[in-house]
Image (cartoon, grey):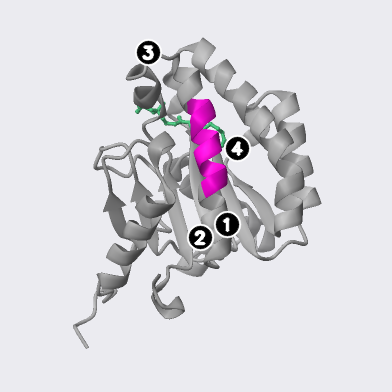
Amino acid sequence: MNPPEQLPKHIAIILDGNGRWAQSRNLPRSEGHRQGGETLKKILDVMLEINIPYVSLYTFSTENWKRPKQEILTLWKLMKEFFSQYLNEAVQKGIRIKVSGDISKLPKENQNIINESISKTKKNKKLIVNFCINYGSHKEILYAVNQILITKLNMNKKNYNIKITEKDIERHLYTYPLPSVDLLIRPGGEHRISNFLLWQSAYAEIYFTNVLWPDFSREDLIKALHWFAQRERRYGGLKH
Ligand code: FPP
Protein backbone atom coordinates (compact mmCIF):
# COMPACT_ATOMS: atom_id res chain seq x y z
CA MET A 1 0.00 0.00 0.00
CA ASN A 2 1.08 3.58 -0.66
CA PRO A 3 2.73 5.46 2.21
CA PRO A 4 0.07 7.76 3.76
CA GLU A 5 1.51 10.92 2.17
CA GLN A 6 1.05 9.38 -1.27
CA LEU A 7 -2.61 8.53 -0.74
CA PRO A 8 -5.27 10.78 -2.23
CA LYS A 9 -7.43 12.60 0.33
CA HIS A 10 -10.46 12.92 -1.90
CA ILE A 11 -11.36 10.18 -4.38
CA ALA A 12 -14.26 10.63 -6.81
CA ILE A 13 -15.78 7.68 -8.67
CA ILE A 14 -18.10 7.56 -11.68
CA LEU A 15 -20.06 4.35 -11.08
CA ASP A 16 -20.30 3.24 -14.70
CA GLY A 17 -20.92 -0.08 -16.40
CA ASN A 18 -23.78 -1.51 -14.31
CA GLY A 19 -26.09 -1.93 -17.30
CA ARG A 20 -23.47 -3.66 -19.48
CA TRP A 21 -22.45 -5.93 -16.61
CA ALA A 22 -26.05 -7.14 -16.33
CA GLN A 23 -26.69 -7.38 -20.08
CA SER A 24 -23.57 -9.50 -20.62
CA ARG A 25 -25.08 -12.01 -18.16
CA ASN A 26 -28.57 -11.84 -19.70
CA LEU A 27 -29.84 -10.15 -16.55
CA PRO A 28 -32.07 -7.06 -16.35
CA ARG A 29 -30.13 -3.77 -16.07
CA SER A 30 -31.58 -3.31 -12.58
CA GLU A 31 -29.56 -6.34 -11.44
CA GLY A 32 -26.41 -4.47 -12.50
CA HIS A 33 -27.40 -1.47 -10.41
CA ARG A 34 -28.14 -3.72 -7.43
CA GLN A 35 -24.76 -5.39 -7.79
CA GLY A 36 -23.18 -1.94 -8.17
CA GLY A 37 -24.51 -1.07 -4.72
CA GLU A 38 -22.95 -4.26 -3.27
CA THR A 39 -19.60 -3.42 -4.86
CA LEU A 40 -19.82 0.05 -3.40
CA LYS A 41 -20.16 -1.30 0.15
CA LYS A 42 -17.00 -3.41 -0.31
CA ILE A 43 -15.02 -0.52 -1.76
CA LEU A 44 -16.10 1.78 1.09
CA ASP A 45 -14.72 -0.81 3.53
CA VAL A 46 -11.35 -0.68 1.79
CA MET A 47 -11.38 3.11 1.98
CA LEU A 48 -12.08 2.94 5.73
CA GLU A 49 -9.27 0.45 6.18
CA ILE A 50 -6.67 2.59 4.42
CA ASN A 51 -7.91 5.90 5.88
CA ILE A 52 -9.17 7.77 2.85
CA PRO A 53 -11.08 10.73 4.37
CA TYR A 54 -13.39 11.76 1.47
CA VAL A 55 -15.08 9.94 -1.38
CA SER A 56 -17.60 11.33 -3.88
CA LEU A 57 -19.82 9.01 -5.92
CA TYR A 58 -21.71 9.82 -9.10
CA THR A 59 -24.94 7.88 -8.54
CA PHE A 60 -27.45 9.84 -10.65
CA SER A 61 -26.66 12.71 -13.00
CA THR A 62 -28.91 15.55 -14.15
CA GLU A 63 -28.67 13.87 -17.59
CA ASN A 64 -29.84 10.46 -16.30
CA TRP A 65 -33.47 11.75 -16.41
CA LYS A 66 -33.29 10.95 -20.16
CA ARG A 67 -33.35 7.20 -19.35
CA PRO A 68 -36.58 5.18 -19.67
CA LYS A 69 -39.00 6.01 -16.86
CA GLN A 70 -39.04 2.41 -15.64
CA GLU A 71 -35.24 2.34 -15.19
CA ILE A 72 -35.36 5.61 -13.26
CA LEU A 73 -38.10 4.28 -10.97
CA THR A 74 -36.10 1.11 -10.36
CA LEU A 75 -33.03 3.19 -9.56
CA TRP A 76 -34.96 5.17 -6.91
CA LYS A 77 -36.23 1.93 -5.43
CA LEU A 78 -32.73 0.42 -5.27
CA MET A 79 -31.29 3.62 -3.87
CA LYS A 80 -33.93 3.72 -1.14
CA GLU A 81 -33.13 0.11 -0.22
CA PHE A 82 -29.41 0.85 -0.28
CA PHE A 83 -29.70 3.76 2.16
CA SER A 84 -32.16 1.91 4.46
CA GLN A 85 -29.89 -1.14 4.66
CA TYR A 86 -26.63 0.77 4.91
CA LEU A 87 -27.55 3.40 7.49
CA ASN A 88 -26.79 1.31 10.62
CA GLU A 89 -23.54 0.09 9.13
CA ALA A 90 -22.55 3.66 8.29
CA VAL A 91 -23.33 4.84 11.84
CA GLN A 92 -21.23 2.04 13.34
CA LYS A 93 -18.32 2.35 10.94
CA GLY A 94 -17.84 6.10 11.45
CA ILE A 95 -19.10 7.05 7.98
CA ARG A 96 -20.68 10.46 7.54
CA ILE A 97 -23.17 10.62 4.68
CA LYS A 98 -23.37 13.77 2.60
CA VAL A 99 -25.40 14.45 -0.52
CA SER A 100 -24.60 16.82 -3.38
CA GLY A 101 -27.31 17.67 -5.90
CA ASP A 102 -30.95 18.70 -5.99
CA ILE A 103 -32.80 15.90 -4.20
CA SER A 104 -36.11 17.80 -4.15
CA LYS A 105 -36.97 16.07 -7.46
CA LEU A 106 -36.65 12.56 -5.95
CA PRO A 107 -39.58 10.53 -4.59
CA LYS A 108 -40.50 11.66 -1.07
CA GLU A 109 -39.42 8.34 0.55
CA ASN A 110 -35.96 8.75 -0.99
CA GLN A 111 -35.67 12.28 0.33
CA ASN A 112 -36.72 11.05 3.78
CA ILE A 113 -34.19 8.22 4.02
CA ILE A 114 -31.44 10.45 2.62
CA ASN A 115 -32.19 13.17 5.18
CA GLU A 116 -32.32 10.60 7.96
CA SER A 117 -28.95 9.19 6.82
CA ILE A 118 -27.39 12.65 6.80
CA SER A 119 -28.69 13.53 10.24
CA LYS A 120 -27.93 10.18 11.93
CA THR A 121 -24.31 10.18 10.71
CA LYS A 122 -23.54 13.87 11.13
CA LYS A 123 -21.15 13.36 14.07
CA ASN A 124 -19.08 10.72 12.25
CA LYS A 125 -15.61 11.69 11.11
CA LYS A 126 -13.73 8.70 9.75
CA LEU A 127 -14.91 8.82 6.14
CA ILE A 128 -17.22 11.32 4.46
CA VAL A 129 -19.18 9.63 1.67
CA ASN A 130 -20.62 12.23 -0.65
CA PHE A 131 -23.43 10.78 -2.81
CA CYS A 132 -23.91 12.95 -5.89
CA ILE A 133 -27.58 12.49 -6.75
CA ASN A 134 -29.41 14.45 -9.44
CA TYR A 135 -26.04 16.14 -9.75
CA GLY A 136 -24.44 17.97 -12.67
CA SER A 137 -21.52 20.39 -12.49
CA HIS A 138 -23.10 23.00 -14.77
CA LYS A 139 -26.20 23.14 -12.53
CA GLU A 140 -24.02 23.26 -9.43
CA ILE A 141 -21.91 26.17 -10.66
CA LEU A 142 -25.01 28.10 -11.80
CA TYR A 143 -26.61 27.44 -8.41
CA ALA A 144 -23.48 28.76 -6.66
CA VAL A 145 -23.33 31.91 -8.81
CA ASN A 146 -27.03 32.66 -8.27
CA GLN A 147 -26.72 32.16 -4.51
CA ILE A 148 -23.74 34.51 -4.40
CA LEU A 149 -25.58 37.14 -6.45
CA ILE A 150 -28.61 37.01 -4.15
CA THR A 151 -26.39 37.40 -1.07
CA LYS A 152 -24.28 40.20 -2.54
CA LEU A 153 -27.26 42.12 -3.93
CA ASN A 154 -29.04 41.85 -0.59
CA MET A 155 -25.99 43.19 1.21
CA ASN A 156 -25.75 46.28 -0.94
CA LYS A 157 -28.51 47.04 -3.42
CA LYS A 158 -26.59 49.92 -5.00
CA ASN A 159 -23.43 47.92 -5.52
CA TYR A 160 -22.87 47.88 -9.29
CA ASN A 161 -19.35 46.58 -8.81
CA ILE A 162 -20.12 43.12 -7.59
CA LYS A 163 -17.17 40.77 -8.03
CA ILE A 164 -17.35 37.04 -7.56
CA THR A 165 -14.19 35.35 -6.29
CA GLU A 166 -13.03 31.72 -6.48
CA LYS A 167 -13.55 31.47 -2.71
CA ASP A 168 -17.18 32.64 -3.14
CA ILE A 169 -17.83 29.89 -5.68
CA GLU A 170 -16.09 27.22 -3.60
CA ARG A 171 -18.19 28.11 -0.57
CA HIS A 172 -21.43 27.73 -2.50
CA LEU A 173 -20.74 24.47 -4.33
CA TYR A 174 -22.96 21.55 -3.28
CA THR A 175 -19.81 19.71 -2.19
CA TYR A 176 -18.66 22.39 0.29
CA PRO A 177 -16.69 21.95 2.60
CA LEU A 178 -15.05 18.99 0.85
CA PRO A 179 -11.56 19.69 -0.56
CA SER A 180 -10.79 19.43 -4.26
CA VAL A 181 -10.60 15.98 -5.86
CA ASP A 182 -7.15 14.31 -5.97
CA LEU A 183 -8.05 11.14 -7.86
CA LEU A 184 -11.02 10.67 -10.19
CA ILE A 185 -11.71 7.04 -11.14
CA ARG A 186 -13.91 6.09 -14.10
CA PRO A 187 -14.56 2.39 -14.59
CA GLY A 188 -16.63 1.14 -17.55
CA GLY A 189 -14.26 1.98 -20.43
CA GLU A 190 -15.46 5.49 -21.35
CA HIS A 191 -12.92 8.33 -21.38
CA ARG A 192 -14.91 11.36 -20.32
CA ILE A 193 -15.87 13.25 -17.18
CA SER A 194 -19.61 13.57 -17.94
CA ASN A 195 -20.31 16.84 -16.09
CA PHE A 196 -18.97 15.45 -12.78
CA LEU A 197 -17.16 17.70 -10.27
CA LEU A 198 -15.67 19.90 -13.01
CA TRP A 199 -14.62 22.71 -10.67
CA GLN A 200 -13.40 20.36 -7.94
CA SER A 201 -11.37 18.18 -10.34
CA ALA A 202 -9.36 20.99 -11.95
CA TYR A 203 -6.10 19.31 -10.88
CA ALA A 204 -7.32 15.76 -10.28
CA GLU A 205 -5.41 12.81 -11.68
CA ILE A 206 -7.87 10.89 -13.85
CA TYR A 207 -7.78 7.09 -13.90
CA PHE A 208 -9.72 5.15 -16.53
CA THR A 209 -10.24 1.41 -16.47
CA ASN A 210 -12.29 -0.99 -18.62
CA VAL A 211 -13.46 -2.92 -15.56
CA LEU A 212 -17.24 -2.54 -15.20
CA TRP A 213 -18.28 -1.04 -11.85
CA PRO A 214 -19.96 -4.19 -10.42
CA ASP A 215 -16.66 -6.07 -11.01
CA PHE A 216 -14.49 -3.32 -9.48
CA SER A 217 -12.49 -4.97 -6.69
CA ARG A 218 -10.12 -4.13 -3.87
CA GLU A 219 -7.24 -4.99 -6.26
CA ASP A 220 -8.59 -2.54 -8.86
CA LEU A 221 -8.67 0.22 -6.25
CA ILE A 222 -5.13 -0.60 -5.11
CA LYS A 223 -3.95 -0.54 -8.73
CA ALA A 224 -5.47 2.94 -9.13
CA LEU A 225 -3.78 4.08 -5.91
CA HIS A 226 -0.37 2.82 -7.07
CA TRP A 227 -0.86 4.61 -10.37
CA PHE A 228 -1.78 7.78 -8.44
CA ALA A 229 1.36 7.53 -6.27
CA GLN A 230 3.51 7.59 -9.43
CA ARG A 231 1.95 10.79 -10.80
CA GLU A 232 3.90 13.95 -10.35
CA ARG A 233 1.44 16.66 -9.39
CA ARG A 234 2.73 20.04 -10.49
CA TYR A 235 -0.47 22.15 -10.37
CA GLY A 236 0.73 24.15 -13.36
CA GLY A 237 4.20 24.71 -11.88
CA LEU A 238 7.53 23.13 -12.83
CA LYS A 239 9.17 19.89 -11.83
CA HIS A 240 10.97 20.05 -8.43
C1 FPP B 1 -24.19 3.88 -14.42
O1 FPP B 1 -24.23 2.61 -15.04
C2 FPP B 1 -24.80 3.82 -13.11
C3 FPP B 1 -25.88 4.54 -12.70
C4 FPP B 1 -26.61 5.48 -13.58
C5 FPP B 1 -26.43 4.37 -11.36
C6 FPP B 1 -25.49 4.08 -10.22
C7 FPP B 1 -26.35 3.52 -9.18
C8 FPP B 1 -26.07 2.52 -8.34
C9 FPP B 1 -24.75 1.91 -8.10
C10 FPP B 1 -27.28 1.95 -7.65
C11 FPP B 1 -27.21 1.90 -6.17
C12 FPP B 1 -27.42 3.23 -5.57
C13 FPP B 1 -26.60 3.72 -4.66
C14 FPP B 1 -26.85 5.03 -3.99
C15 FPP B 1 -25.40 3.00 -4.29
P1 FPP B 1 -24.91 2.50 -16.47
O2 FPP B 1 -26.33 2.11 -16.27
O3 FPP B 1 -24.70 3.78 -17.21
O4 FPP B 1 -24.11 1.34 -17.11
P2 FPP B 1 -23.88 1.14 -18.69
O5 FPP B 1 -23.00 2.27 -19.15
O6 FPP B 1 -23.21 -0.17 -18.74
O7 FPP B 1 -25.25 1.13 -19.35
Residue at numbered disc 1? 172
Image-based side of 145 in relation to 91, left or right: left
Residue at numbered disc 4? 102
Residue at numbered disc 2? 169
Separation of marks 1 and 2 at Cα, in angstroms: 5 Å
The answer to which of marks 2 and 4 sits earlier in the sequence is 4
Determine the residue positioned at 55% across, 36% down. Answer: 38
Q: Residues within 10 Å of mark 2 (few under 14, many from 20)?
A: many
Determine the residue positioned at 43% across, 61% down. Answer: 181
Query: In this rendering, which labeled residue sits more in front, label 2 or label 4?
Result: 4
Instruction: Magenta stretch: give its range.
Output: 33-42
For label 3, the SS is loop
The answer to if 38 sits in the magenta stretch is yes
Work out whether 79 lies above or below 131. Answer: above
Q: Position of residue 169 (x, y in %)?
A: 50, 60
**Tag 4: residue type?**
Asp
Image-based side of 35 in relation to 14, left or right: right
**Tag 3: residue type?**
Asn
Q: Position of residue 228 (x, y in %)?
A: 31, 66
Q: Position of residue 28 (x, y in %)?
A: 45, 14
**Residue 230: which quarter of the image?**
bottom left
**Residue 83: which quarter of the image?**
top right
Determine the residue positioned at 33% across, 58% down. Answer: 224
The answer to which of marks 3 and 4 sits earlier in the sequence is 3
